[in-house]
Image (cartoon, rainbow, N blue to C red):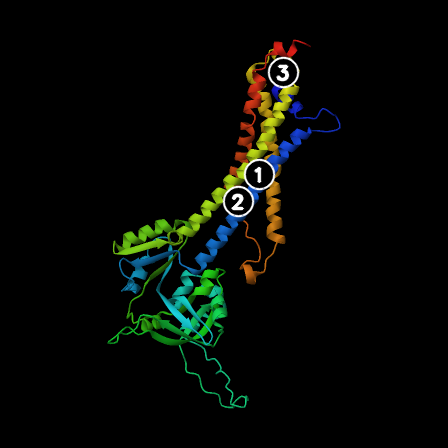
Amino acid sequence: MTLPYEILVGLRYLKAKRRQRTISLNTFISIAGITLGVAALIGTLGIMTGFKEDLQTKILGTTAHIIVQERGTNDMKGYANLVTQIEQVPDVLAGAPFIFKQVLVTSKTAVQGVVLRGIQPEQEVRVTDLQDNLKFGKLDDLDHPPEFPPPSSTNDSGTETTNPPQRKKLPGIIVGKELSFRLGVFLGDTLNVVSPVGPMTSFTMTPKIRPFTVVGIFESGMFEYDSSLAYISLGEAQKFFSLGDTVTGIQVKVKDVFLAQDIAHRVEALLGAAYLARDWMQLNRNLFSALKLEKTMMFLLLVLITLVASFNIVGTLTMIVNEKQREIAILKAMGATPRAIMRIFMLNGVVIGLVGTGIGIPLGYTFLYLIQNYWTFDASVYYISKIPVHILPLDVILVGASAILISFAATLYPSWQAAKLDPVSALRYE
């Protein structure tokens, strides 16, 4: 099979004049520019996608996929029947009631404002990963706190007494790892939970205070959660906040987290207009919108690298056109059309783009492999031990197509210059 002469001539123009080199230096620089641009884009998008998905996993491990609440109030009644109805919705795996309040917690050494969640341990394991995130203690200890040894007591001489005071059995509380550090508490220690909303006196409202025993410490991987979140049993929360048989809302877990919005609409349609269902994307809309915008802007900025590399292609082809004026004139004199001349130089740019993209994509994958496997962090400081990486096939296709398209666009002006060359002027003094 004989190749069209445009291909043969175009590939010949990419070679060096000296026989010792396969391609010219200008061609090599143009290919290297495209290669580095593609590799940088693949690496950046892979890291940003990995961070986004890692953050998404940590958020969904602590919070539910859908939150159902009653409109206009935080006191939902008849929640047991509502949970049963919600679990009948297709693609819903489980539902669990919860109470959500902001309180102060105090220890012997510190005070901290936290979000207190009242949960049912047997239902919570069905909708979140709290049980898996526990580093110390068990989730069931909220309902049945274990017996911890009483703290040792000393007399005035500094020696330990033989009969330390017996500890009163208190309800259990689970706190985050960072929160336990700030308060200086561990398993078996006592915390005081302070609610600013308490009984009314003749003058003012008095805070409500109740002691709890730390029965568990969790680590979700999200600093915001680990430093400002605590759990108690649903029954204890109802008693402490004087809620009676009501809850704040219902947590829902679904089969596919990316269909949560559609499922939330189905839940609303089932329960009626009196209830509001919000999916995890809506609850964390600002965060994920910022991540999406950042990824888009990084893509656009790094495309500039490829655009800069495309100027090398323009310069290379322009130099070839100036050097090959005699050959172009001869081709035209032999019957080559202006379109055929344009195809010769367009082929040069496309070849540079294809070769640069073909080398840049594996180079980007190699960079990400090295980053993920050989660059480690102190997990106690950065909350991650390795950089999360995930490359989406759509991102690779988008990067490759963009590089090839930019390379092709860079050939238009030099090809047009070559096509309009007058063979008489070029061959006048030959």
* Residue at the extreme right of the image, as rendered: 20
Q: Secondary structure at mark 3?
A: helix
Residue 253: name its quadrant.
Answer: bottom left
Q: Is residue 372 left or right of residue 192?
A: right
Task: Bin the neighbour count of mark 1 within 10 Å (Cα to Cα): few under 14, some 14-19, many 20 and up.
Answer: many
Cα–Cα gap, marks 1 and 2:
11 Å
Can you say whether 123 is above or below 266 in the image? below
Task: Bin the neighbour count of mark 3 within 10 Å (Cα to Cα): few under 14, some 14-19, many 20 and up.
Answer: many
Looking at the rendered structure, the kind of residue marked 3 is: Ile
How many badges with numbers are in the image?
A: 3
Nearest to N terminus: mark 3 or mark 1? 1
Nearest to N terminus: mark 3 or mark 2? 2
* Mark 3, residue position: 328
Are dots 3 and 1 in contact, CB under 8 Å?
A: no
Instruction: Give coordinates of residue 311: x percent, y percent.
Output: 58, 30
* Mark 1, residue position: 38
Nearest to N terminus: mark 1 or mark 2? 1
Q: Nearer the viewer, residue 420 or 134?
A: 420
Which dot marks residue 45? 2
Instruction: Give coordinates of residue 31: x percent, y percent.
Output: 63, 33
Instruction: Give coordinates of residue 256: x percent, y percent.
Output: 42, 51
Q: Is residue 246 left or right of residue 230?
A: left
Looking at the rendered structure, the kind of residue marked 2 is: Leu
Q: Secondary structure at mark 2?
A: helix
Q: Secondary structure at mark 1?
A: helix
Residue that appears at 39% across and 51% down: 285
